[in-house]
Amino acid sequence: MSSAPAASVLFVCIHNAGRSQMAAGFLRHLAGDRVEVRSAGSRPGEQINPSAVAAMAELGIDISDQKPKVLTPEAAQASGYIITMGCGDACPYFPGKT
């Protein structure tokens, strides 16, 4: 019997190429399918930072298949928790979200 994830988390930074991708990778690794994990950026980059991929690989976590994604209102609304990561005014506020 499969159950729905207990929570949905969206990690946001400006380029979605380093911090938010790493955070999402850690949560996927630690929570497995118990938590739905997303990441996005207010101004996504072209690719994930190779240093972030290498650092995570050193810990046995593979994020090499991830791509930067644009932050959309739909992704925010579908997430129970939104964690912004140092993007200041470049990350919009979504009322009603934890």
Image: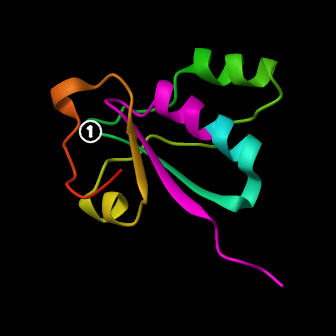
| Residue 31 at x, y percent in the picture | 72, 49
Q: Quadrant of the N terminus?
A: bottom right
Against 7, residue 89 (above or below) is: above
Most extreme residue toward the bottom, as rendered?
A: 1
Judged left or right of residue 8, residue 76 is left
> For the residue marked with disc 1, what is the amino acid?
Ser
Chosen colour scheme: rainbow
Most extreme residue toward the left, as rendered?
A: 89
Judged left or right of residue 5, residue 83 is left
| Residue 11 at x, y percent in the picture | 45, 41
Q: Residue at x 52, y 59 (%)?
A: 8
Label 1, residues with CA under 10 Å away: few <14, some 14-19, many ≥20: some
| Residue 66 at x, y percent in the picture | 58, 43
**Count of picture labels:** 1
Q: Mark 1 points at which residue?
A: 42
Residue 63 magenta-highlighted: no
Residue 64 visible, this angle: no
Q: Residue at x 31, y 30 (%)?
A: 14
- Residue 7: image quadrant is bottom right
Residue 38 visible, this angle: yes
Q: Which residue is drawn at 32% across and 64% down?
A: 77
Against 18, residue 1 (above or below) is: below
Residue 11 magenta-highlighted: yes
Q: In the depicted view, which residue is nearer to us: 87 or 96?
A: 96
Q: In the depicted view, which residue is nearer to us: 52 or 83?
A: 83
> What is the secondary structure assignment of the residue under circle 1?
loop
Q: In the depicted view, which residue is nearer to us: 17 or 6?
A: 6
The residue segment tinted magenta is: 1-24
